[in-house]
Amino acid sequence: MNIGEMLDEIKSKVKEDQNLGKKFLETRRDAEPLTAFCKECRKLGYEIYEMDLIEAGEEFYAAIKRSTNGGGENSPVLKGENDFYEMFFAELETQTEREI
């Protein structure tokens, strides 16, 4: 299972358990938020480490760039598409706002 699939499963679990979502949101306040986030993932049984998370986003972004317009200089600039961590929280925060 790749990082994206693991994060999707975690998001599904968070939708079912608000307390789990709060735990993940609390990691943002940690002195090392990415490390705290990955620790929470591992507590759930998902072997996600900081560099794996960063690398997965970079690889995903590179694949998108290569697939558009030959991957050359004229490829579209994609903002935030390489940061799975930030995308996870953007979705979690949106979900939390809907529930309030």
Image: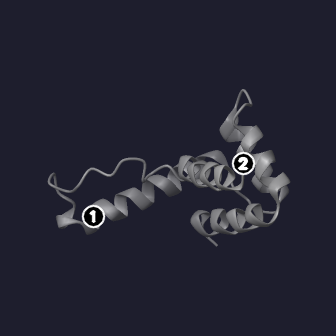
**For residue 7, which quarter of the picture?**
bottom right
| Residue 58, horizontal then vertical, whole percent | 44, 52
Residue under the point 42% across and 48% down:
80
Color theme of the render: one colour
Q: Tag 1: Cα neighbours inside 10 Å, few (<14), some, or many (≥20)? A: few
Secondary structure under tag 2 reads helix
Secondary structure under tag 1 reads helix
Q: Tag 2: Cα neighbours inside 10 Å, few (<14), some, or many (≥20)? A: many
Q: Which amino acid lies under the numbered mark 1 shown in the image of this protein?
A: Arg
Quick check: 81 left or right of 48? left
| Residue 8, horizontal then vertical, whole percent | 63, 67
Classify 66 as above or below 51.
below
Dot 1 or dot 2: first in sequence order is 2
Residue under the point 49% across and 54% down:
57
Q: Which residue is mark 1?
A: 66
Q: Which residue is mark 2?
A: 38
| Residue 38, horizontal then vertical, whole percent | 72, 48
Question: Label 1 vs label 2: CA separation?
Answer: 29 Å
Residue at the farthest top position:
31
**For residue 69, which quarter of the picture?**
bottom left
Q: Which amino acid lies under the numbered mark 2 shown in the image of this protein?
A: Cys
Residue at the farthest left position:
74
Residue under the point 68% across and 63% down:
11
Classify 13 as above or below 84.
below
